[in-house]
C-alpha cells in the first residue's frame, strides 16, 4: 500500500540555522500539507499546497517558512532561521482529488538547540 | 481557540469490551470528520471518517457516530484489543472537497488491558 515518506526522521540543528524537511507524497495525490505537533500539544496545520502554489497557510507559517515541490515527487518544507520554539514533530500529508481523507507520513522530529 | 475538543485525555478498557472515544466541535462549518490513531514516534494513521450527511459509518470493529445537532461525534471500538492501545485524534474539515486543512483535537490515550 502506498505511503507518505519523510526524511530525515530526526534532525538536530542550532538556532538560526536553515533546515529543509523532505516528503514524498503518495504518487497519485494532488494535495499536500504540512502539520506540526509540539510535544504534549495537538497536531496543528501549517500549510496546504495544490497545483504548485500555496492554497492556505496558518498564522504559524510566517516568512521564515516556505514550501516547494522541486520535482514530480518531492515536497519540502524549509525553515530559514530556526528558533527554539520550532522544535516539534513535523508531519507531511497528502490527499487525492475529490477526497477529504489525508494520509500522513511518519514525521520528522526537529530539535532546535 | 479549541474548535475540536476531546475532553477525556485518557481511557482504560478491558480487552474484549467496548471502547468509546468522544469528540465535540464548535464550528458549524465542519462537514467532514475523521479519526486517526497514533503510536509514539509515528504519524497519524487514518482509521475511519464520516460526512455530515450521515449519522453513522462502520468499518469492521470501528464505528463512528455523528450527532450534528449536539456537535458531537464518537468512535466505538468493539471488541477492543491490546493492539488498539494508542492515542486517538478526532479531526474535522470544512469543505466538501479535498484540499481543506484538518483541525485536530487534543487526543485521547486509549489503553486496552489484557
Image (cartoon, coloured by chain):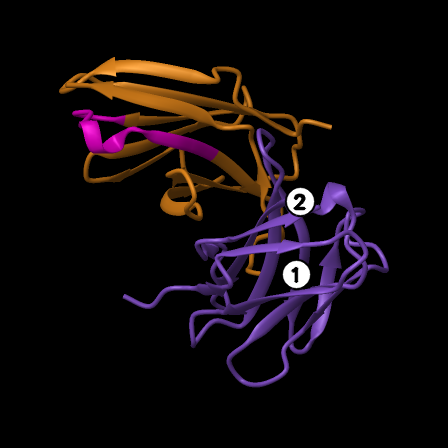
Chain colours: A purple, B orange
Taking the magenta stretch, the answer to whether it contains residue A11 is no
Asked which secondary structure carries label 2, the reply is loop
Magenta range is B77-89
Asked which secondary structure carries label 1, the reply is strand
Q: Looking at the image, is B70 positioned above or below residue B100?
A: above
Q: Nearer the viewer, residue A1 or B33?
A: A1
Residue B106, by quadrant, is top right
Q: Disc 2 vs disc 1: which is toward the camera?
A: 2
Horizontal side of B32 relative to A70 (left or right) equals left
Q: Which of A107 and B24 is in front in this view?
A: A107
C-alpha separation, residue under disc 2 versus residue under disc 1? 20 Å
Q: Looking at the image, is B94 positioned above or below residue A62?
A: above
Residue wearing tag 1: A48
Residue displayed at 75% across by 43% down: A84
Taking the magenta stretch, the answer to whether it contains residue B82 is yes
Residue wearing tag 2: A87
In the rendered image, residue A79, in percent from the top left (x then y), is placed at: 74, 61
In the rendered image, residue B79, in percent from the top left (x then y), is placed at: 16, 25
The residue marked by circle 1 belongs to what chain? A
Amino acid at each position: 500500500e502506498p505511503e507518505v515518506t519523510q526524511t530525515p526522521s530526526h534532525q538536530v540543528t542550532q538556532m538560526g540555522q536553515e533546515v529543509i524537511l523532505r516528503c514524498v507524497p503518495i504518487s497519485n495525490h494532488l494535495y499536500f500539507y504540512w502539520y506540526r505537533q509540539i510535544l504534549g500539544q495537538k497536531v496543528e496545520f501549517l500549510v496546504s499546497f495544490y497545483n504548485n502554489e500555496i492554497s492556505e497557510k496558518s498564522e504559524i507559517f510566517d516568512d521564515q517558512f516556505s514550501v516547494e515541490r522541486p520535482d514530480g515527487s518531492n515536497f519540502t518544507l524549509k525553515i530559514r532561521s530556526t528558533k527554539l520554539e520550532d522544535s516539534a514533530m513535523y508531519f507531511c500529508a497528502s490527499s487525492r482529488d475529490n477526497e477529504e481523507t489525508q494520509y500522513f507520513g511518519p514525521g520528522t522530529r526537529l530539535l532546535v538547540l | 481557540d479549541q474548535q475540536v475538543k476531546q475532553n477525556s485525555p485518557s481511557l482504560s478498557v478491558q480487552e474484549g469490551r467496548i471502547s468509546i472515544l468522544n469528540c465535540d466541535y464548535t464550528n458549524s462549518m465542519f462537514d467532514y470528520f475523521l479519526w486517526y490513531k497514533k503510536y509514539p514516534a509515528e504519524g497519524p494513521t487514518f482509521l475511519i471518517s464520516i460526512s455530515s450527511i450521515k449519522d453513522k459509518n462502520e468499518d469492521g470493529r470501528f464505528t463512528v457516530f455523528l450527532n450534528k445537532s449536539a456537535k458531537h461525534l464518537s468512535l466505538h471500538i468493539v471488541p477492543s484489543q491490546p493492539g488498539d492501545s494508542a492515542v486517538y485524534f478526532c479531526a474535522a474539515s470544512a469543505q466538501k472537497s479535498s484540499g481543506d486543512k484538518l483541525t485536530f483535537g487534543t487526543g485521547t490515550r486509549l489503553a486496552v488491558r489484557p
